[in-house]
Image: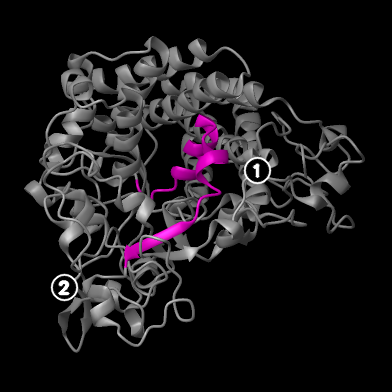
């Protein structure tokens, strides 16, 4: 199948990003000699191609800055180690790649929009204006979910522009700006079904609606739980955007692999499926990644906090279900559970690792190449190809997928109304559960078992979207981070189980730490904190210094 491939071009045209003070002796300062360019719609199309390189990709697939994963690696937003981001020990940094790159792409989108206003091509370039508006909104989204309010720049600046010292707009103003850009983009963009074969992967109306729904849900719940703004306004916008996505009929959950579809969605088999709304693209022998190998070597491992959230096969939490088999053996906690657990975690004994030409049974543990700090290992995103095993991953990173839209609608309906009907559950969460071969979530189930519907909606979001980079921002918008994040990060039960028998030489208190119930402690609560300031990340120090006092640091930093 032919697929749209990114071409780098605007970097040749747009060289100076907002706030940059280097190369001031160059002439011209911030412009290119483009008198012969911007003459045809194809010129605008070519310029938009590099916007796609700004999609976050693997940066979005990181949850080890939260409670459901343990690991290291650099957080792109703060330019700090993810472990310090998780435990609250991180400090403001001089620079942050996310800040710099976001404003680089914002400047580029502003540049195209300026050229579009100057152009006489009219409707012939509407689509490329739509793509620019989408990517401007996308890059502001990446900023606002990390920093809250940021400077809003709507035109191309040079090194003498007074707008270089623009103060922050409020978080709600930035969200409103994002939504406005997306609304203006939607009518200019094609439907997914209108893409030709060589356009597959370009931005569509669906991508704009999905980002609108995501941003509106974020701001609606932030307003509700942080007491900042009109929650109902944004929740309504999230509902409307999600409803339009569903009504379009353009997307559907991936079910091509039957009961195993969830596993295959995130690797090659799921690329270009009807569930994928927008993805960062990769290609054999041209643009590959190493995500499978990173995960094999435990860049990020699950925690007990996530493991315990998977329901038993009867649809009940493990604290209430008679089906739960406990923790005594290596595999007992995986038995009779939501199948997504074994498609997200490596179930001990599964054939995963590629060695000597065959796939080997894998037993997560505490020594050798399979050693982890929690005793768990990640199965999700592990490709089953020799190329992936040899550092040449080719599957796409799914930035927006249809299951998230369904989860947004369910959550927004409940948050706005304080309830959700079984009918609405059936067309949102229960579609996702059908794919997972799990019982439906119903009001009767919740009431009969003393559950809380909001907790169950959030549980479904957590397990379905695990390791796709949503968890930290979810905890912050729900204002539960201050309770959840300071808790110890734990792993498998060691004392009195098959793990202790398998590793008899490990000394408790020396080689491993355990809690009073015998569960592994990967990081104790005494080493973790979440203060009010952690609800927003610190603005890079150099940006504050360069602003001549107009850019205020976020509270507490």
Category of crowding for the residue at label 1, using alpha-carbon neighbours closer than 10 angstroms: few (below 14), some (14–19), many (at least 20):
many
Category of crowding for the residue at label 2, using alpha-carbon neighbours closer than 10 angstroms: few (below 14), some (14–19), many (at least 20):
few
| Res. 145 visible in picture | yes
Q: Which mark is residue 268?
A: none
Residue 149 percent coordinates (x, y): 69, 31
Instruction: Tell me if residue 468 is in the magenta stretch.
Output: yes
Q: Quadrant of residue 168?
A: top right
Residue 549 percent coordinates (x, y): 91, 38
Q: Nearer the viewer, residue 293 or 488?
A: 488
Q: Nearer the viewer, residue 458 or 512?
A: 512
Magenta residues span 466-493
| Res. 44 visible in picture | no
Residue underneath mark 1:
534
Q: Residue furthest right?
A: 548
Q: Residue at x 46, y 24 (%)?
A: 217
Cβ atoms under marks 1 and 2 closer than 8 Å: no
Distance of mark 1 from mark 2, alpha carbons? Answer: 39 Å
Q: Nearer the viewer, residue 217 or 302?
A: 302
Residue 51 percent coordinates (x, y): 52, 45
Q: Nearer the viewer, residue 77 or 274?
A: 77
Residue 142 percent coordinates (x, y): 56, 40
Q: Secondary structure at mark 1?
A: helix
Q: Quadrant of residue 205?
A: top left
Residue underneath mark 2:
349
Q: Quadrant of residue 342?
A: bottom left
State whether residue 75 is above or below residue 238. Answer: below
């Amino acid at each position: 199948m032919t697929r749209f491939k990114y071409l780098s071009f605007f970097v040749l045209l747009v060289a100076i990003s907002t706030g940059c003070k280097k190369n001031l002796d160059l002439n011209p300062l911030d412009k290119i000699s483009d008198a012969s360019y911007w003459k045809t719609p194809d010129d605008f199309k070519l310029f938009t191609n590099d916007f796609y390189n700004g999609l976050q990709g693997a940066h979005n697939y990181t949850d080890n800055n939260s409670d459901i994963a343990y690991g290291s690696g650099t957080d792109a937003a703060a330019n700090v180690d993810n472990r310090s981001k998780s435990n609250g020990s991180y400090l403001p940094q001089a620079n942050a790649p996310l800040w710099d790159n976001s404003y680089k792409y914002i400047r580029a989108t502003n540049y195209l929009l300026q050229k579009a206003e100057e152009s006489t091509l009219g409707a012939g370039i509407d689509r490329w204006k739509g793509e620019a508006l989408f990517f401007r909104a996308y890059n502001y989204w990446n900023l606002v979910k990390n920093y809250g309010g940021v400077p809003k720049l709507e035109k191309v600046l040079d090194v003498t522009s007074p707008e270089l010292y623009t103060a922050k707009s409020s978080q709600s103003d930035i969200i409103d700006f994002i939504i406005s850009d997306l609304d203006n983009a939607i009518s200019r963009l094609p439907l997914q079904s209108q893409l030709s074969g060589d356009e597959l992967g370009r931005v569509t109306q669906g991508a704009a609606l999905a980002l609108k729904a995501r941003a509106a849900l974020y701001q609606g719940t932030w307003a509700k739980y942080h007491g900042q703004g009109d929650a109902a306004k944004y929740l309504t916008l999230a509902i409307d955007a999600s409803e339009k996505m569903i009504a379009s009929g353009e997307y559907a959950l991936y079910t091509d692999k039957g009961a195993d579809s969830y596993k295959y969605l995130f690797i090659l088999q799921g690329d270009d499926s009807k569930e994928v709304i927008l993805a960062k693209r990769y290609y054999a022998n041209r643009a590959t990644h190493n995500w499978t190998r990173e995960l094999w070597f435990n860049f990020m491992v699950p925690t007990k906090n996530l493991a315990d959230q998977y329901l038993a096969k009867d649809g009940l939490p493990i604290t209430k279900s008679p089906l739960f088999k406990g923790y005594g053996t290596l595999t007992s906690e995986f038995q009779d559970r939501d199948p997504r657990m074994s498609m997200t975690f490596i179930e001990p004994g599964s054939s995963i690792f590629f060695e000597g030409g065959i796939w080997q049974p894998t037993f997560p543990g505490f020594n050798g190449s399979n050693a982890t700090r929690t005793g768990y290992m990640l199965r999700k995103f592990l490709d089953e190809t020799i190329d992936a095993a040899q550092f040449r991953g080719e599957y796409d990173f799914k930035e927006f997928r249809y299951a998230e839209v369904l989860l947004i609608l369910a959550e927004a309906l409940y948050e706005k109304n304080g309830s959700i009907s079984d009918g609405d559950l059936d067309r949102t969460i229960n579609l996702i559960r059908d794919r997972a071969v799990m019982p439906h979530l119903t009001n009767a189930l919740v009431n009969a078992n003393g559950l809380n519907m909001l907790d169950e909606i959030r549980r479904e979001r957590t397990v379905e979207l695990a390791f796709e980079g949503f968890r930290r921002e979810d905890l912050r918008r729900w204002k539960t981070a201050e309770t959840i994040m300071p808790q110890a990060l734990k792993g498998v039960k060691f004392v009195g189980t098959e793990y202790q028998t398998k590793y008899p030489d490990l000394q408790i208190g020396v080689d491993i730490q355990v809690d009073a119930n015998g569960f592994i402690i990967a990081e104790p609560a005494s080493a973790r904190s979440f203060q009010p300031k952690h609800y927003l990340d610190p603005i890079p120090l150099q940006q504050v210094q360069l602003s001549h006092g107009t850019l205020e640091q976020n509270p507490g930093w």
